[in-house]
Amino acid sequence: MPQNVTIKLPIPPRLNAGLAAARERNLEWMRQHKLVSGHSAIHRYMFSAVADLAAYSYPDVDGDDLDLAFDTMGWFFLFDDLFDVPEGRKADAAVDVCQQLIALVSHPSSRRVNHDVPLVGAFADIWRRAKRGMSEEWQRRAAHNWVDYLTGNLTEEIDRRTWIPQDFATRMRIGHRTLGLIPSLDLAERVGHFEIPQIIWHSSHLESMRRAAVDSVKLINEVMSLENDDARGDPNLVRCLMRQRHCSREEAIELAIILVQTTVNQLFEQMKLIPLFCARLGLTSTESEKVQRYASAMCTWIRGSYDWSRNNGRYSPRTASALSPNVTGQLHPANLTAVSP
């Protein structure tokens, strides 16, 4: 049921016309970086349709920019599934990759970085392309946001090892770091070839808008991935609501939907204040337009994550039926790089 859940959003659906061709180019990039090999692995990756998220979230870009978006989205999910190991085991390989990536972004010349590790080498390529044409200020901010995302994944791994049930607020707080939306909004600037004025990015107003966007996308993701999480025994916000509100699964899903809609409405109210926000800062019309584009990217991401979630193979009943606490994640390297007959 979760993948078919209807969430009414005041944002029109959009889809990049270059999806099919970009999908094929992304697969070739995955092969070149040794992230996917063998017929069964290719089928599994293509069925998941994880890179397609880029077509829903960046509907206006094309060419190299669209390829960068596709490659980044595909990488995100392979990295995420690296942490999905059989119950009782520690995701030591994922922790090592995570630490190498932190070193790569923070200290590019670090000897700790092994580019022969596929997920590390692939990210190095993404990061090199993402920085192209962007200011040093943007690069520093984007690097900070990547490190926050990566260290958030380390936090989540340590929490898994303690086996302590998380409450709703804690899971949402961690989700702000591990969802990856903040780096994805940085990417919206990169593929859109614009930058919001650096100091403005740190304003409370834009921070509140980002928080609303992250909350919305996180809640959508938790609802749509519920069957996968149930199959693996992983934590999920819906189950947090069930425990805290003493309600049924269906009631918790409905509550999560209401929370999404409430948060989106809050974002829309905040967006109405952007003209006043820009005027009080004395921004030029060009600078104000960039702030509006950044805000629009948040809305596009919310709608895109919802439409993609309803159409991908990753959250399908077929995928959920193949998962259990005793197997690796759907896109774990063990399932994508084994030699097929």
Image (cartoon, rainbow, N blue to C red):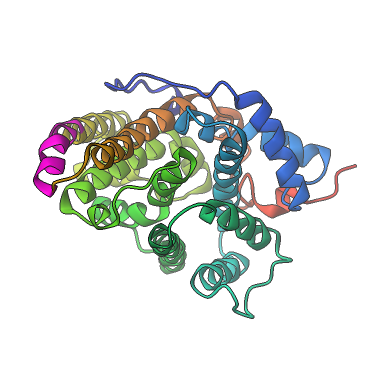
| Looking at the image, residue 103 lies above or below residue 178 | below
| Looking at the image, residue 34 lies above or below residue 298 | below
What residue sits 11% from the left and 41% below the top? 279
Between 149 and 334, the one nearer to me in the picture: 149
Of the 4 image quadrants, the one containing the C terminus is top right
Where residue 322 appears, as percent x and y from the top left, is: 63, 38
| Looking at the image, residue 207 lies above or below residue 308 | below
Q: Is residue 53 left or right of residue 43?
A: left
Most distant residue in the bottom direction: 111
Between 192 and 247, the one nearer to me in the picture: 192
Q: Is residue 65 left or right of residue 175?
A: right
Q: Which residue range is magenta in the image?
A: 268-281
Where residue 187 appears, as percent x and y from the top left, is: 46, 46
Q: Is any atom of residue 193 visible in this view?
A: yes
Where residue 298 appears, as percent x and y from the top left, is: 33, 37
Q: Is residue 341 highlighted in magenta? A: no
Of the 4 image quadrants, the one containing the N terminus is top left
* Quadrant in which residue 103 is drawn: bottom right
Q: Is residue 276 highlighted in magenta? A: yes
Where residue 175 appears, as percent x and y from the top left, is: 35, 52
Q: Is residue 173 left or right of residue 95?
A: left
| Looking at the image, residue 244 lies above or below residue 224 | below
What residue sits 42% from the left and 29% below the top? 304
What residue sits 80% from the left and 46% below the top? 37
What residue sits 41% from the left and 66% below the top? 155
Number of numbered tags placed on the structure image: 0
* Quadrant in which residue 111 is drawn: bottom right
Secondary structure character of the magenta stretch overall: helix
Q: Is any atom of residue 86 visible in this view?
A: no
